[in-house]
Image (cartoon, helix red, strand yellow):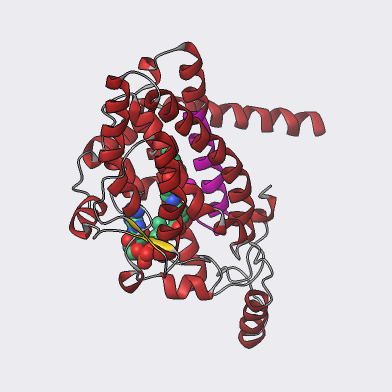
Amino acid sequence: MYTQAIDIPQNHPDSQGADATGRDLAFEAAIADDRKVEPQDWMPEGYRKTLVRQISQHAHSEVVGMLPEGNWVTRAPSLKRKAILLAKVQDEGGHGLYLYSAAETLGVSRAEMVDALHAGKAKYSSIFNYPTLTWADMGAIGWLVDGAAIMNQIPLCRCSYGPYARAMIRICKEESFHQRQGYDIMLSLARGTAAQKAMAQDAVNRWWWPVVMMFGPSDKDSVHSGQTMKWGIKRISNDDLRQKFIDATVPQADLLGLTIPDPDLRWNPERGHYDYGEIDWAEFWQVVNGDGPCNRERLDARVAAHDKGGWVREAATAHARKAAIRERRSAA
Ligand code: FAQ
């Protein structure tokens, strides 16, 4: 899928490239005509860097995002739920791998991206720094976190950068299964005993606001949105996606008979949207800046997993080296 990466992009220092004005115009025309920019095409350095930042953060989010749910694989209440959860967590790991591959087409290596994460220099989504305390959290994550992720990611299927857009198409198909499995858990709990329904409500109470924050700072405080929207990377602003998510989710909560923990939430017929309460941006920035409930635990777990997996990488590299020698010998 990403074999284009072996071509040297024309904006790479090793490339001679065409004259600067022609290259700029070709790039701008591709954006204006809504054509895809591909790895071998010339692109402005700012566009490349923005994509590396966003795609690598996205990849890290998928991989770190395996941890909160992975915590419950051994404690799922039935064999069926365990198999589904295991498959979902594996899917998230796969999403991380497609996204690292998409970012690699921009001239950055997976090792560099992973090092940046482990050094605390690269971000991942704030949402994965909250703890998973009960089984109902598996329902709330699937329903709300994956629901928010789909809302954010469907427009990314139309991103101007080809490899990212194509990766997102498959990811979104899988996320939609994830969202439904989460809703199915919530439905079982909400229709179960009073204690089960209370557990589901408690999960919604704890996850609702962090999920609403997941869409990022409000448009007036979003540093990158203006430029990324001009470049066709982001198609819908943080606040508009947040509003779309709230509008879609309130009726789903009603169907479950669960209450959204926002006393200011009400339908506004003039706007044709739900009004909602004030977001605690101090909490958001605290979590983004590394001081949320589980930031240290998540990063430590990632670093430990990477270190423990070192022998697998070494074995795979040794195997590839031997296979290449064998191939060369048989071709000689
Ligand atoms: N957490 O100027 P903006 C998933 C940072 S995948 C942490 O608005 P931008 C699947 C932002 O990076 C979830 N940091 O930035 C799953 C920037 O800092 P920087 C991840 C955040 O890029 C489900 C600064 O704030 N999805 O859930 C957050 O235009 C279940 C200023 O913000 C993606 O990554 C945040 N929530 O918009 C897995 C989607 N929000 O980089 C497992 C792709 C903002 O200058 C289980 N990414 N920041 O240091 C995007 O759409 C965008 O990058 C946004 C942020 C919307 C996340």
Predominant SS of the magenta segment: helix
Residue 176: image location, x then y, percent: 55, 40
Look at the image and give the residue range highlighted in magenta. 88-110
Task: Answer with the quarter of the image where residue 78 lies.
Answer: top left
Is residue 62 visible to us here?
no
Where, quadrant-wise, is the C terminus in this rendering? top right
Picture coordinates of residue 220, whole percent (x, y) = 32, 74
Considering depth in this image, is 29 or 106 the residue closer to the camera?
A: 29
Q: Between 328 and 158, which is closer to the camera in this rendering?
A: 158
Q: Is residue 41 above or below residue 330?
A: below
Residue 318 in percent (x, y) is at: 55, 28
Q: In this image, 314 relative to 319: left or right?
A: left
Q: Residue at coordinates 24% horizontally, 52% vertically from top-left?
A: 263
Q: Is residue 193 above or below residue 313?
A: above
- Left or right of 102 on screen, residue 141: left
**Residue sticking out furthest to the top:** 79
Q: Residue at x 57, y 45 (%)?
A: 172
In front of the other: 274 or 77: 274
Q: Is residue 108 magenta?
A: yes
Looking at the picture, does residue 211 appear above or below residue 8?
above
Task: Name the quadrant containing residue 323.
Answer: top right
| Residue at image point 34% right, 32% down | 68
